[in-house]
């Protein structure tokens, strides 16, 4: 389980094809906090740490995950958002996230609005039905509040802290981003549907 509060950035050092997908090697100071088998969110995707050291860790990414996320775009040199799994004694500062990406959106527009930056993301209709204004959404593993929703997109406003501490500060129009909708919305839909 994660909160969407990015704890650090990593850089993809290598991508090694395996028969079942790829193994990513990621350089990050967070490597020293990992033990083999620990969960870590990489751009919002829950992965398992392999061979962590003081400055790196590796993670195996299955073909299914590559198809359902934007990690296929993460080549050597790419920066990624990182978050260690939530500890039971930690604060829940963002929102509850599983690290199970629901789909990939595309950054459609970026506009400065005072000190914040408004980012509009194109989203498939089957995901957009779970998104509400002022609700939570995870974009590349970052917990954000939805500022607007229309027929085929959602918008979020990024404060300077988010722009500085996450890869969203360097995002450009056309970039694919991982999306995880609020899991509570999916459970509510399931429960309501069961009682019809």
Image (cartoon, helix red, strand yellow):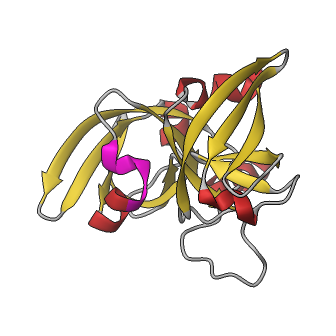
Front-most of residues 196 and 115: 115
* 181 lies left or right of 20: left
* 72 lies left or right of 121: right
Front-most of residues 42 and 136: 42
In terms of secondary structure, what is the magenta stretch mainly?
helix
Quarter that holds the N terminus: bottom right
Q: Residue furthest top?
A: 19
Q: Residue furthest front?
A: 54
Q: Is residue 20 magenta?
A: no
Q: Residue furthest left?
A: 114
* Vertical relation: 142 (above or below) 42: below
- Rendering coords of residue 45 (x, y %): 66, 44
* Vertical relation: 186 (above or below) 106: below
* 123 lies left or right of 173: right
Front-most of residues 56 and 78: 56
* 47 lies left or right of 101: right
- Rendering coords of residue 142 (x, y %): 50, 56
User: Number of numbered discs present?
Assistant: 0
Point 70% across, 45% down: residue? 100
- Rendering coords of residue 105 (x, y %): 46, 33
Q: Is residue 163 visible?
A: yes
Front-most of residues 121 and 20: 20
Query: Which of the 4 quarters of the picture holds residue 50?
Result: top right
Point 64% across, 29% down: residue? 14
Q: Is residue 69 visible?
A: no
- Rendering coords of residue 75 (x, y %): 55, 26
Write the start and end of the magenta stretch as one range.
Answer: 165-170
């Amino acid at each position: 389980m994660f909160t969407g509060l990015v704890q650090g950035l990593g850089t993809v050092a290598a991508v090694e094809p395996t028969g079942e997908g790829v193994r990513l090697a990621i350089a990050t100071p967070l490597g020293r906090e990992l033990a083999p088998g620990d969960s870590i969110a990489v751009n919002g995707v829950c992965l398992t740490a392999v061979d962590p050291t003081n400055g790196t860790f590796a993670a195996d990414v299955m073909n299914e995950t590559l198809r359902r996320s934007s990690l296929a775009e993460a080549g050597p040199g790419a920066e990624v958002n990182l978050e260690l799994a939530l500890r039971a004694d930690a604060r829940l500062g963002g929102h509850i996230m599983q690290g199970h990406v629901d789909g990939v959106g595309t950054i459609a527009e970026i506009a400065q609005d005072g000190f914040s930056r408004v980012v509009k993301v194109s989203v498939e209709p089957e995901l957009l039905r779970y998104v509400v204004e002022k609700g939570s959404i995870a974009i590349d593993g970052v917990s954000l509040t939805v500022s607007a929703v229309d027929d085929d997109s959602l918008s979020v406003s990024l404060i300077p802290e988010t722009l500085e501490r996450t890869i969203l500060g360097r995002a450009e129009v056309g970039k694919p981003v991982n999306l995880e909708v609020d899991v509570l919305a999916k459970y509510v839909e399931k429960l309501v549907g069961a009682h019809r």
